Amino acid sequence: MALNRAVLPDANRNLEQLYEEFVTRARALGTEVYRVPNLAKASELVGKLVQEMGVRKVALAESPLVTALDLAAAVAGAGAEVTGGNPRERAGAADLGISSFEMAIAETGTLVQDATEINRRLVSMLPPAHLALVSTNRLVGTLQEAINNLAARGQIPGYLAFVSGPSRTADIERVLTIGVHGPGKVVVIFIDEGGSAGE
Amino acid sequence: MSKTALRQATREALANTSVCSALERFSDNYVVAREQAYRQKDFEGLRREVARIKREAAECMEELADQFTREATRRGATVFRAATAQDAREYIARLARSRGIKTIVKSKSMASEEIHLNDYLKEQGLDVVETDLGEWIIQLARQRPSHMVMPAIHMSRNEVAEIFSREIKEPVEPEISSMVKLARRELRKKFFSSWMGISGANIAVAETGTIVMVTNEGNGRLTTTLPPVHVIIVGLEKLVPRFTDIAPILEVLPRSATAQHITTYVTMITGAVPAVDPDGNYHEQKELHIILMDNGRTSMAADPVFKEALQCVRCAACLNVCPIYQQVGGLFGDIYTGVIGTLLTAFLTDPKRAQVIQYLCIDCGRCRDYCSGNIDLPALIGELRRRTVEREGMGYVEKVIFEKVLVNRRLFHRLLKTASRLQKPFAREGKIRHLPLFLSGLTEGRTLPAIADIPFRDRVGTLPRPDKATGRVAIFSGCLIDFVYPCIGESVAKVLAALGFEMVHPEQQTCCGYPAKQAGLTNIFAELARQNVAAFAGIDAGHILTACPTCAEALKFLYPQLLAGDPVWGKRARELAERVTDFSSFVHAHREKLTPLLVPLQQKVTYHDSCHLKRYLRVAAEPRQLLKDAGADLVEMNRSDDCCGFGGSYTIKFPELSKSILNRKLESALDTGAEVVALDCPGCRMQIGGGLDHRNPRVQVMHTAEILARCLPGTGRA
């Protein structure tokens, strides 16, 4: 089929270029973008951001990356607490949700998450702010590459979420307003050396 | 709704100036922002790809529905095939009853609007809450969405504040960001307490059983996540064969809808996923019900012409750029609005209404250039009109005019000459400023030109000739130039003589037939096409020139299509078409010879792009170059290719609407400070000239041919 280009990102397309493109697009949408070299720096940055945002309650969606970062400790170290209860309560009570994403699309500043697991969906939707973690090497150039990538995997996950910036509406007088139903603040941390947890 | 009621309704819609200006403002911004969003993208390539996918899908709709059903079922969904709106409504109500569900949250779904789902569920005692902000506002106001993508575009912040205040029984400040917060807070309560969520779908993938939804607010994600029962209503036209088909559709949909590269959220649901219900209980698999709805779609797919409309991805670009929609909003449509809305209305919601509202299309062709599904929308409206007239017939007077007069050239021309005498009491200096009685609306805010004393065809013998002819050109004058603006014809002759062309004007030529096409009378159009083909068949001239773009479109593109089924006439029509050129393109090709002869104009000129010249003949640069060659100081007006509101008989059918569109054009033109408005179409000249005569008679309107002729020595310059 004519449309199917290589499933893997073109090796010639430098990761740095993809990252730059992502940053430009994502910032235009209102996403805050950070990049760290490794897991240790990532935990440190999460703690710092939690403190800066002044959040008290944080909801975590478990994933290998979240576990590897030992975020519970980072959050506690920043003077905030990790929420408890059933998944609705955990996410519903939080000021900030943290979850990991599987892919990032440079041309649109989009993050892609397999959100089949209920916690990931709730944690990335209910709190007013969201912090997304993604491995830098999961950047792809285009939406089409991302779709082809997913198609090539075999079984499509039950719930795929593509997120491009904060929740927005322009339904009243076409005035752009941020944070209607989903998070009004979206922060992403790219981690260069995420180890096996980032895969 | 009758045609008279429709005209009355357009007056009422025009009176709502806040809607008009909101839609106009949106449209102006949209065009610019959309252009940006498509930078680095090949829109033409993408829409051809989308069209290919959707065409293929429409051809095997039934197979795709079966495949989708199998795949989604395998992944834990329950798929229900609803043949009618009633089947779909009942299924949902039954489901809610059997699960003891009382409250339902909904995210935006046009399919649910189509079947009036909310009203039905309310009758069944269910509490249904729309959660898309615009839809919620509309629901609270007990109104109907006026736009497929932006349902509350017609409302002001003050109106919204009033509506919210009524709902929460507290005063609400008309401040947008705080009202958005209020909506978040109120609707969160609904999300947390609801046991059923209902959503629509933008794409349904047969190969994987996947449903794709695009949203910006996030209510779609909450609707599909919080309630333990999820119902998706999806029209059969949303099916595509493969997962990879999602990509091109997702590339065009947000860009064409709201000029976004991508919507904030794109959600892809494949089968039943876990959920936690309002009581906090975990469900390994929620209940997912997918309603595959037909409700007229298979009959659309089976229609040899209208199946093309199934290529639509519901981006609403055709509304966003439609000059009529900007003026009358939701009146132009039913549940689905605008041009595509009219076509969908004919098959999905209210065929009777579609037969009337299709008359609102002015045939400017702008939507065709913007359609993400590459649909020839004006052609489909033309077909709807043809079928309407075939079924319903037309008024006696109209019928006589078309069937007895227009096809009889001698009678038609004799009547025009008689009319020229009869109009004398109303005409001064070739213009009619006021008409009595029921015709008065035509001259309100606009002057009409008088029918010429001597038509162009009777002036041919006295026209300038080249000193030494180097070629021969035949002229197709068209009714407006022949009987209203012979001066344009004379200018054409003068320019041709200067270029060394001898001009012939075959006497047997008649109306190009476009008015008959516009009236839905294909047989009369074809008869006139044959008469004109015959009139030019034996004429020894390399080129056939016309200074009217609509005539050019008819001769060059429509005749060959129209007569294609007839081996003899089809061939002759193609031979004619090959020789046809519009005036400016022809002269442009000989401009090296013309330019040295021109005495510079030294006037500030702005150029209006006529719809049929720019969008059907694809000519825009040529006349501008000629004007520059003539020494004009060319200044571009804003939105130079916006329709002027003429549209042939449109100006008589909907005079108020036509004038409203004209006013916008006049403002753009006058804003430039130009002394002359140049254009290439006698129809636009009549409309814009008539308006300028009232607004600012010092500004002249001239056909490019007239300007060039004026710059040739031998005529007095104004």
Image (cartoon, coloured by chain):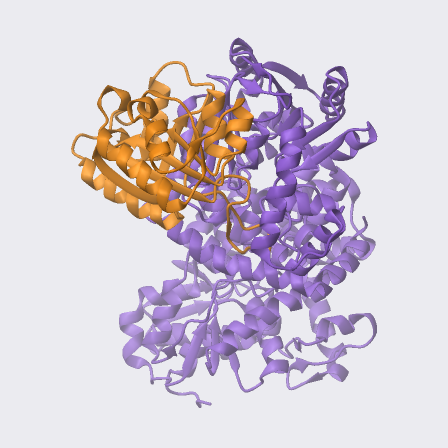
Chain colours: A orange, B purple
Label count reads 0
The quarter of the picture where residue A6 lies is top left
Seen from the viewer's position, the closer of residues A128 and A78 is: A78
Q: Where is the C terminus of chain A found, in terms of image quarters?
A: top left
The quarter of the picture where residue B469 lies is bottom left
Residue beneath the point at 68% across and 50% down = B330
Q: Position of residue B181 (x, y in %)?
A: 58, 48
Q: Position of residue B585 (x, y in %)?
A: 38, 62
B581 to B430, vertically: above or below:
above
Q: Position of residue B98 (x, y in %)?
A: 75, 15
- Is residue B512 visible to the viewer in this orientation of the structure? no
Seen from the viewer's position, the closer of residues B237 and A62 is: A62
Seen from the viewer's position, the closer of residues A68 and B357 is: A68
Q: Position of residue A29 (x, y in %)?
A: 39, 47
Residue beneath the point at 23% across and 26% down = A194
B433 to B611, vertically: above or below:
below
B469 to B240, vertically: above or below:
below
- Is residue A169 visible to the viewer in this orientation of the structure? yes
Q: Where is the N terminus of chain A found, in terms of image quarters?
A: top left
Drawn side of residue B184 relative to residue A123, left or right:
right
B273 to B638, vertically: above or below:
above
Drawn side of residue B243 relative to residue B215, left or right:
left
